[in-house]
Image (cartoon, rainbow, N blue to C red):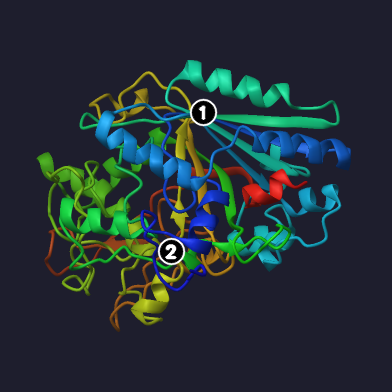
Amino acid sequence: MPVDLTKPLSWKSAQGDEATMLAELQPNIVKPHVRDHLSVLFVRFDDAGEARGFLSALAGLMKSAKAHLEEVETFKVSHTGGTPYVGVGLSRTGYEALGITAAPADPSFRLGMRDPLTREKLADPPRSSWDVAYRDRIDAVVLVGADTDAALTAERNEVLRLVPDSVYVLGEETGLSRVNERGEGIEHFGYVDGRSQPLFLTEDIDAEKHTTDGVNEWDPSAPLGQVLVADPAAPDPSVHFGSYFVFRKLEQNVRRFKQAESDLADALGLTGDDRERAGAMLVGRFEDGTPLTSNSGPGSHSPVGNDFSYDSDDLGQKCPFHAHIRKTNPRGSGGFEDPADERRHLMARRGQTYGERADDPNGGEPIRARPTGGVGLLFMAFNSDLGDQFEFTQQIWANNTEFPRVPEGTKPPGLDLVIGQGPRPETTYAPAWGRNGATPADPAAQAVTMKGGEYFFMPSLAFLRNL
């Protein structure tokens, strides 16, 4: 059976070309490959032959998407731990350094994240302000993930053992998952993260439908073509696929964000437990993941409720139009496109937190005890079209003060106050949940700083083996 990119895939019943595709696809693309410990190595190639040999040898450490899915299924039955994960991506300059002309053709990939046109489009900071490892050419990224620090160290050492003298390790990022008291993944501001993912496997869609709060309001299913791209340099692009990979290091000034939450609560006159709603109005969810458009306070069940829309909040009286999750996934309420077209912009996010801190992200420590830097998110996402997914989300949604469309006479939404980049106009809020009113408030100061990144293509295993 040929690979059908127009719909989700059932991996358990995949046959023919679909089975071959899964056997040659890197893991972490169609389903997250969750590992608490992560090393991200950025490298440069100075000799094409040695670089090809290095990548071909790395393929021997890598498993397929099919093997990963089988590991997940085995864990459900026997709780047997999974094996480490190794992933590989190449930038445009990486393909050039290898002497490969049949490189992926996405225009944004060809430009790269360092290009002035890309930085202008995304409103990114000057390249000179990025961390040193990202300022100049990066040819490849190698991801190593494992359940324990010891397993990560062992697998990372295996990767480094393969590195020849002409392959330079330019820098490394170390990720470490953070969870709340219920074991749910959180980011450094303390909010549950990783929900609202597009789902590409029918088994995952069924699980969302039957084991969570359902999919009546929000259907997370997405076609394979929203994440997979034929691998142009592979032996057989009809069965060998990859995906465009976005990496961005986003540093979080937790103290600044928590101060913004407190200042907003003061400006709106929120008192007692209701002060938590100030942070939820910036993010769109409470710290425990409860959607603000559905509830005026925290208390979501586990797993976090995600079956909601903004149909009952078209005036922004519950969840502000500029709240982070409303800006980056309007769920059909953006006003400029049909709901089906809006869904095309969603990408498969695979981010992980980085950095150590002494305080509890969900604890009651004073604001002055919060970190001002050194912690953040290693933002990672898979796309089939960088311009229409990641770049669209950042430029047209998060950075666009006019998105989403609001009722006539209503103040424009302004930036996404979590990840938006650019001048921040005054914002307005309904002080009482679900009530009329538009109280002005100073916008939250920017607390997320982009420190560097690049676009890569995660090729098929067949491509790597045949270098």
Residue 397 appears at what percent x and percent y?
Answer: 45, 67
In the visual, does 237 lie left or right of 28? right
**Mark-to-mark CA distance, 1 and 2:** 29 Å
In the rendered structure, which amino acid carries the disc numbered 1? Gly
Q: Is residue 400 among the parts visible in the rendering?
A: no
Q: Quadrant of residue 47?
A: top right
Tell me, for residue 346, which label it has, or none: 2
The picture places residue 436, in percent across and down from the top left corner, at 14, 70
In the image, residue 233 above or below residue 265: below
Residue receiving disc 1: 374
Q: Is residue 163 among the parts visible in the rendering?
A: yes
Which residue is rendered at x = 39% and y = 37% of the image? 71
Identify the residue at image location x=61%, y=58%.
240
Q: Which mark is residue 7?
A: none
In the depicted structure, whether residue 28 falls above or below residue 307: above
Kindly report which numbered mark, 1 or 2, lies closer to the viewer in this rendering: 2
Q: Residue furthest front?
A: 16
Neighbour tally class for label 2: few under 14, some 14-19, many 20 plus, Cα within 10 Å: many
**Secondary structure of residue under mark 1:** loop
58 versus 197 height, above or below: above
